[in-house]
Image (spheres, rainbow, N blue to C red):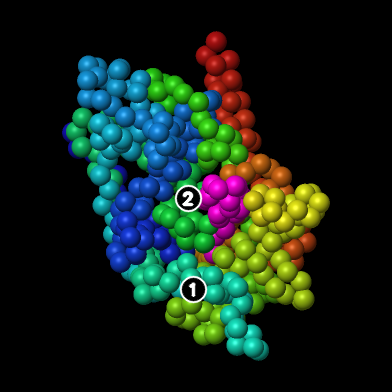
Amino acid sequence: MIKKLELTVQMLSPLWAAGAAGKCDRLHETGIIGSLRWWYEAIVRGLDGCYACDPASESRCELSGKEKSDEERRAKLCPACRLFGCGGWKRRFRLVAGAGSTEPFTLASLFYKNKSNEDEFNRWWLNEIFESNLADRLAFGKVTLTFIFPAGTDGEESLNQIKALLSVMAHCGSIGAKGQYGFGQFAWEGKTKLETALKDIQSFILGRQFKESKNENDWYSLEKFWYINIPLMDDNAQIKRFEKARLEQEKSIGPTTGKLYLPVSFDIRYKLKGGGKWSGLRQAYYQKQFEETNNDKKQTEKKTRLIFGGQWHEGSDQHRQGSRVFVSHPYKHGPGDENYKLRVWGFTDESVAEVVKKELQNIFGLNDTPEYTTGLSLIAKLQQKNREGYEHEV
């Protein structure tokens, strides 16, 4: 029997769901599915030592077609491949996505042409990396997601996993690509509590046989996850600077019309200038590493790129690392919302989170250091509930 999950989410910052060429010419379902799988893998890896493969690695799951039973097939599949598919195994669902409205690509930066008519770094860099997207339109506002589970695909189980997964992403992450640049924040009225969603995923995984192997240390995992949600008042001095930049043509990339979000994630994440001093999350982390490595620029840059993404060379080999720290645009849930919200999350050691917290306090002039939640604390709660449930049964 075919099952369906139809839901509507409210995009709070634009949804980046591009095709293979990186263009957001329409709402590409593949971009959404990729982010769903990425989050599911990270969650699974943090639950009681469960394994989720990297589909781009040589150790990825694959079926030969010679397996004679469902038990044999499951023993060769990690939970992520079981739900999202791999060689020899079909994805358990089909996704149809639709956007109620789209809007032109836009970003803003406090850096603009200086008195010598030279581009300051941030704005130059944003133009460089998004040059091919400047004419794109991104989904914003209401987005409908319809998950279709064909007969014979464990429809009810798969449906429940998708609901739990989307709940986690709505609470502390994003959907679609380029979350590190502020895209993909969304609200979903149907989400369950964060702890409940994680418990639902855990219960499904532990109740079945899946491929057993070892996760690599550098893979994204709930064990190294943390997130920060902070409110920012309209009259916050930094927020006012960002609002002004959004409406000034010389500081904007794309249209300068007012929105319910401030497209300035890159400034927060990378580098800001104010009061004669530099700030920004990457800048703060770089400075700390520079001091800890006794002013070794090469090692400092390597360590910084391992956290915030980028390329570096070791001998004749070139390495590239995706960002492990993600920063939303400041966003509002609606026109009547007095506060902006900012979400920052990462998959790093807690020492990085400590740097991020202090720098957010510095950037926005907060009286108190922002509080944050770690994946380890969420895992500990799950383990406690499991123990309580076991003791109750006994």
Q: x and y percent of residue 76 in the render?
A: 35, 23
Residue 291 shows in this picture: yes
Name the residue that disc number 2 marks.
170
Residue at 59% in and 20% down: 387
Total numbered labels: 2
Q: x and y percent of residue 334 in the render?
A: 49, 67
Camera-near label (2 vs 1) is 1
* Region of the chain picked out in magenta, as a range: 305-330
In the rendered structure, which amino acid carries the disc numbered 2? Ala
Instruction: Indicate whether 377 appears above or below 103.
Output: above
Is 71 magenta? The answer is no
Residue 360 shows in this picture: no
Q: Which mark, by number, is residue 127?
A: 1
Instruction: Indicate whether 26 appears above or below 301.
Output: below
Residue at 51% in and 70% down: 126
Left or right: residue 91 compared with residue 187: left
Is 318 magenta? The answer is yes
SS at badge 1: helix
Q: Quadrant of the N terminus?
A: top left
